[in-house]
Image: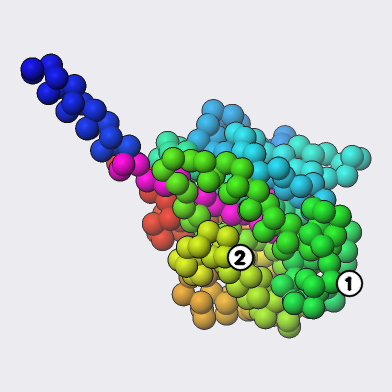
Amino acid sequence: MKRIILFVGLVLIGVAAQAKKKPVPVFIVAGQSNTDGRVPMSDFPAEITQENYQHCLWSYGSGTHAADGTFTNFWPKTYIAKNKNPKRWGYDAIVYDLMGKASEQDFYVIKESLGGTAISPKAPKSTQRMYWSADEAFLDSVQSASQGGRSLLKALCDHIDRCIDGQLSQIKQGYDIKALLWHQGESDVKQAKAYQKNLTAVIAYIRQHLVNKTGNKKYATLPVVIGGIAHKSRDYSPTLEAAQKTIAETDANVYYVDVHDAPLLSDNLHFNREGAEQLGQKVYKLLIELRLWQEKRK
C-alpha cells in the first residue's frame, strides 16, 4: 500500500512540475545591416563557442530568403551576395550568448533582417527596392519580399506566422513573445523627418498582427527595444535619432538604447566588434531590468 501511495505521489509531483513550466520565451529581431551583422567572424569573441548557444533556437529570414518556420541552434550567419563574405555577426550574437549563460533556459528567436533597407518607399536607396513601410497604400500594392515582392514588413509577419504554425504552437507549455529588438534607420537618413511616423506605424502593425494571429491582446503593447545609431556613422542623422528617442518617450513600452559613441568598421557605417559588443551588452542589461529575461539564482 505504501508503494502505491508513493507512486501516486511521484506521479502527482511530476504532473504539478509539468503544469508549472512557463511558456518558452520568444524574441523577434528585425532591421537592416547592423541587425543582420557585418562584423567579420575573424573578430568573433574566442570565448564564445557553439556550446554557448545551446539554449538559443532561431529562425532566420532575409528579404527574398524565406524562412520555413523551422528553428535550429543559433550560430552567426548572413544571407548576402555570393561575392561577399557571409560569415559575419551582429550585436544580437552577444545578446544570445549572455542570455544563455545567465539562465540556461531555452529561448527562441525569429530574425528577419536585410542590409541597406529603408522604411519609407520615398528613400532614395533600399536593397532591391524592398521596404519596411506600414503605409496602407504601399502594402495594398505589393507582396511579401519572401514571395518575390517588396514588403519586408509582410515578410516578417509571414515569417512569424510560419514559426507559430510550424513549431511554437506545438510546444506543450506554450510560448510567450517577449519583445521586438529593432536596429534600423541608416537607409532612411534622407527621410528622417518622416521617421517617427513611419517607425511608429511599423511597430503598431507588428503588434496588431501578433494580436490577430494569437488572439492575445497583451501583444498590443509588446515591448520594443530600439538600438541607436553611432554618431560617427556616415548615415547618422540627429533628426532621425530624435525621432527614435521621442517614440520611446511617448510609448511606455518602447525603449531606446544609446550607443552614440560605439566604434565602427572602416566603412564608417557598421559596428566593429567593440561596437556590436557595446550594443549587445546594453540590450541584454535592459532585458534584465525590464524583467523580460531572468538570470538564474546563484
Question: Does any portion of residue 202 appear in the rendered image?
Answer: yes
Relative vertical location of residue 247 with respect to residue 258 in this rendering, above or below: below
**Callout 1 amino acid:** Pro
Question: Does any portion of residue 115 appear in the rendered image?
Answer: no
In the figure, is residue 3 to the left or right of 155? left
Q: Residues within 10 Å of mark 2 (few under 14, many from 20)?
A: some
Kindly report the distance in space between the C-alpha atoms of the residues bearing marks 2 and 1. Answer: 28 Å
Which residue is outermost to the bottom? 193
Which residue is outermost to the right? 83
Q: Position of residue 172 (x, y in %)?
A: 44, 40
Q: Which numbered tag is attached to residue 209?
A: 2
Which residue is outermost to the left? 1
Relative vertical location of residue 241 with respect to residue 267 in this rendering, above or below: below
Would you name the residue on which mark 1 appears? 124
Residue under the point 60% across and 34% down: 73
Disc 2 or 1, which lies upstream in sequence?
1
Instruction: Please identify, in this view, whether the residue under mark 2 or under mark 1 is nearer the observer.
Output: 2
- The quadrant of the image that shows the N terminus is top left
Quadrant location of residue 182?
A: bottom right
Residue under the point 48% across and 41% down: 171
In the figure, is residue 105 to the left or right of 163? left
Residue under the point 73% across and 83% down: 193
Q: Position of residue 138 (x, y in %)?
A: 81, 74
Q: Which residues are magenta?
A: 19-37
Q: Is residue 278 magenta?
A: no
Classify mark 2: helix, strand or loop.
helix
Residue under the point 91% across and 40% down: 83
- The quadrant of the image that shows the C terminus is top left
Classify mark 1: helix, strand or loop.
loop
**Callout 2 amino acid:** His
Quadrant location of residue 104?
A: top left
